[in-house]
Amino acid sequence: MPAAMALTPTEQAPARPLIHKVSGFLPDLKFTLQGPDDTLVTEDALAGKVVMMFFGYANCPDICPTTMGQLSMVMQKLGDDARNARILFVSVDPHRDTPEQLQAYVSMFDAHAMGLSGTEKQIANVARRYRVAYQIEKPQGDDPERYEVTHARGIYIFDQQGKARLLASDASSVGELAENVKALMRP
């Protein structure tokens, strides 16, 4: 039996795309969630903006701060066009993420980002709508605030009319994301 041979870089399988077109496969942008100061926020607050929506939680040790940093760099790369885009961070940890804490968290990355939380039911409804998986583990030990949360990692991108257009991997490059967001802004 011949020994396995490594593929050279030119022989390797082509990379899978990290940004997928989802027009017609995912529903339009629609939600009712809690913003700071007991404000109910709906998709109407983002009318006319390209929206990059991400699900996570403020205490996340790795995925969320990395993705928020990445989306912040996308906004910087958009330059003046950033006024036509918004980052929307939806918490899947309503027990620890108050709307005020969440807004403070996302504002550290981008001044115009929106951090929204809600009741367990509100969050579950939005997550189910976009097929987002997440799970909150039982608290560890005597501390009810000490528990793990797992969640999906995709970035949902909606056009200025709120139509679901793209689903991006958090492994997408800043340049790729910015290019795709900018393309959605063109008439």
Image (cartoon, grey):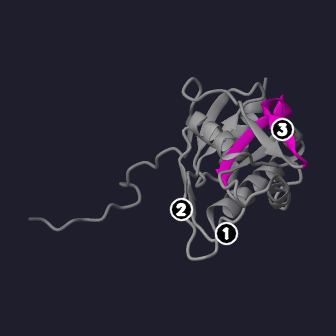
Say which label, 2 or 3, has the lower sequence index. Answer: 3
Residue annotated with mark 1? 145
Q: Looking at this rendering, what residue extends furthest in the left direction? A: 1
Magenta highlight range: 37-56
Amino acid type assigned to the residue bearing label 2 in the image: Glu
Residue annotated with mark 3? 40
Is residue 98 toward the left or the right of residue 7 in the image? right
Residue annotated with mark 2? 137
Amino acid type assigned to the residue bearing label 1 in the image: Glu
Say which label, 1 or 2, has the lower sequence index. Answer: 2
Residue 94 versus residue 76: which sits nearer the camera?
Answer: 94
Say which label, 3 or 1, has the lower sequence index. Answer: 3
- Residue placed at 73% from the left, 31% from the top? 184
**Magenta stretch holds residue 53:** yes
Q: Secondary structure at mark 2?
A: loop
Label 2 environment density (alpha carbons within 10 Å; few <14, some 14–19, many ≥20): few
Is residue 6 toward the left or the right of residue 58 in the image? left
Q: Is residue 129 above or below residue 82?
A: above
- Residue placed at 69% from the left, 58% from the top? 95
Measured as percent of width and height from the top left, residue 175 is found at: 69, 50
Measured as percent of width and height from the top left, residue 99 is found at: 81, 52
Is residue 147 toward the left or the right of residue 111 in the image? left
Measured as percent of width and height from the top left, residue 145 is found at: 67, 69
Residue 94 versus residue 61: which sits nearer the camera?
Answer: 94
Q: Secondary structure at mark 3?
A: strand
- Residue placed at 89% from the left, 40% from the top? 83
How far is disc 3 from disc 1 in space, using C-alphas? 25 Å
